[in-house]
Amino acid sequence: MTVDIARENLEIGAGSREVYEPSSPVAQFGPDEPLHLDAGVDLAPFQLAYNTYGTLNASKTNAILVCHALTGDHYAASQSPVTGKPGWWSSIIGPGKPIDTDRYFVICSNVLGGCLGSTGPASINPKTGEPYGLTLPVITIRDMVRAQAMLVEKLGIDTLFAVIGGSMGGMQVLQWTVSYPNKVFAALPIATGARHCAQNIAFHEVGRQAVMADPDWHGGRYFAHGKRPVKGLAVARMTAHVTYLSEMALHRKFGRNLQDRETLGFGFEADFQIESYLRHQGMTFVDRFDANSYLYMTRAMDYFDIAADYGGSLARAFRGSQTRFCLVSFSSDWLFPTEENRAVVHALNAAAASVSFVEIETDRGHDAFLLEEPHFFDAINGFVSSAARARGLSS
């Protein structure tokens, strides 16, 4: 298959041409700049798509790296060219907002293994002219962070003022502080944990099996067949989306309300509003995300376990850290419950690190970090402003 044919087939994939011709800037790393992966192999060449907001100061001390979650992207504070929607953290990043782009230079990259311009399974393998598919080595959170560090270095930045992110983004934040403790002044891991628990791995496995059971998956080579496993990916998204909400939020928004009908249909169409909502979430997701990337991203989260490299001791991972930490959890988040966030806080305390912690009371579940939560905004603003004063950044 030639590259042109592969790209033509890729048009039916997530983000259309954004996969290999992103609208955003792209950092290219050539054959002489390999990335050594945890899988034991080198990846080269590769690329990272990214966006920046604000201005880097003369001393290059005001850079904030924002890390996105599982199905997020690098359009954190700008309109997505795929969905046409505002950036997923536009409420937090911008002039006068908690992450104030009048003061800070914000970087957000599409993670390695993603599907919106960074090298991932939908990208063209230059050696074959075909999409990588499952021939791309498995990617870990630490691999994502290594690639981000190469991007930061390419941008001419020695140290980051802060690294901030929620969920899978929070995992990246924690990994940054362990892998590059001298390069992170402040860290804000949100709604996350130091490892993925068995329940979360189980939910991810259900999603992966849904994708792989779709006959259009073709062992990960669906582009070669002009297909996409949209049904399987939609079911995976539906399953995952339930974990992002809380029972209270589901009851408040939907209860047992019927969808566009007054009586039960006595069939298997969407009788209830919650059924219709989940089906909508599934079908809109497949228009913007690649199925193989979903497999890779969920596997990266499942493999994440910081303490595993330190004899099972999380405190040892943070020993000697000079980074200032603030961890944030949400009271109704059962995907990454408060006790998992507190476990990280306890480990940081044991390591004599500088750490603060806040639990936000809300019934909106795990997704609260993406929503309008005034107390959450206040927590971010307070921590970032305090860290900026300690860093000597002018107001």
Image (spheres, rainbow, N blue to C red):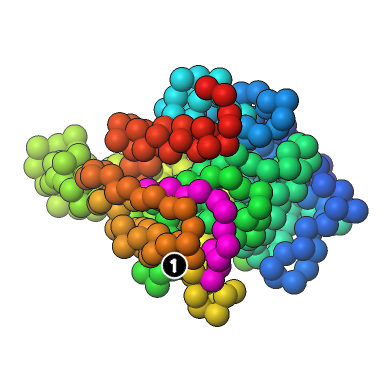
Q: In this view, does 242 lie to the left or right of 233?
A: left
Q: Residues within 10 Å of mark 1 (few under 14, many from 20)?
A: some
> Residue 253 in the image: x percent, y percent?
20, 39
Residue 270 visible in this rendered orientation of the protein: no
Q: Is residue 177 depicted above or below 63 in this figure?
A: below
When asked about the image quadrant of residue 336, the answer is bottom left
Q: Is residue 22 depicted above or below 175 in this figure?
A: above
Q: Is residue 326 left or right of residue 269?
A: right
Residue at image coords 75%, 48%: 150
Residue nearest the observer in this picture, 62 or 269: 62
- Residue 324 part of the magenta-drawn span: yes
Residue at image coords 87%, 48%: 30
Residue nearest the observer in this picture, 90 or 157: 157
Secondary structure beneath dot 1 equals helix
Residue nearest the observer in this picture, 118 or 224: 118
> Residue 59 in the image: x percent, y percent?
72, 30
Q: Residue furthest bottom?
A: 311
When asked about the image quadrant of residue 40, the answer is bottom right
Task: Find disc 1 in the rendering and name its residue.
Answer: 350
* Amino acid on which disc 1 is placed: Ala
> Residue 115 in the image: x percent, y percent?
62, 46
Residue nearest the observer in this picture, 58 or 21: 58
Numbered range of the magenta stretch: 316-328
> Residue 146 in the image: x percent, y percent?
69, 55
